[in-house]
Amino acid sequence: MQLLDVSAVAAHLPLLKGSMTSAWTAIHDNLQGSILPFGLILWAYIAQLGSLRRLLGESQPPLEMVVRREQLLDLCCNLFFGVGVIWTAIGMRDALIQALGDPAASAATGAFDVLQRMVDGGILLALSTTIVGGIGGYLMRACKSVLLGRQLNRLYLRASEQQAVAGLASLERIERSLSAAGAEAGEFPRERS
């Protein structure tokens, strides 16, 4: 029994190529210049996510490095949202300039023509980048939480427990010093209740 029929796959390659081309055209038409910053931020996010995952896989990861990587992941999420917001403003501005740049012509041609010029001028860019920035930013946060949340929580709890233990040890040293000083002076420490 053959698991993979090569001729069947080869027969679908032109369809796949056509689908990929259509998908890229749709993405380019809707996101235009925002593709580059979205792509760069997504690349940085994936790199930082991998780096943080490797750090958390160590037996004793350095807390400062973990915190820094987590901050960079959060920055990537925020920048992804920000690109969506900025390109929304760019798209709205371009759409309004295109649609209302010549008020006399806008009044003469009617509402449908004004709407068409807004669509041609960038309103779809504005809406698309808002959607991509919002969904992408929230998905980035969700991925971080799902993939690394438990490990991060465990690390931060261990670090806070170590601080508490160190604080207790310090208090015990102070208590012993005070007891010794009181014994030398002839005073006895009070009994604990």
Image: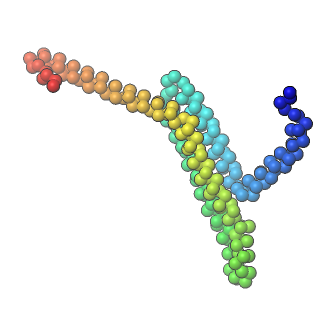
Asked if residue 71 is positioned above or below residue 185 in the image, the reply reads below
Q: Say if residue 76 shows up in the picture.
A: no
Q: Say if residue 147 shows up in the picture.
A: yes
Asked if residue 85 is positioned above or below residue 184 in the image, the reply reads below
The residue lying at 69 percent from left, 62 percent from top is 124
Q: Residue furthest left?
A: 186
| Figure disc tally | 0
> Where's residue 114, x and y in %?
70, 75
The residue lying at 74 percent from left, 67 percent from top is 120
Residue 172 sits in which quadrant? top left
Query: Which of the pair 8/131 is nearer the observer?
Result: 8
Left or right side of 39 for 70: left
Query: Which of the pair 190/10 is nearer the observer?
Result: 10
The residue lying at 49 percent from left, 24 percent from top is 60
The residue lying at 71 percent from left, 67 percent from top is 119
Q: Quadrant of the C terminus?
A: top left
Check the image and tell me how it is coloured: rainbow
> Where's residue 16, x and y in %?
83, 45
Asked if residue 89 is positioned above or below residue 99 in the image, the reply reads above
> Where's residue 94, x and y in %?
68, 66
Left or right side of 68 for 6: right
Q: Quadrant of the N terminus?
A: top right
Residue 34 sits in which quadrant? bottom right
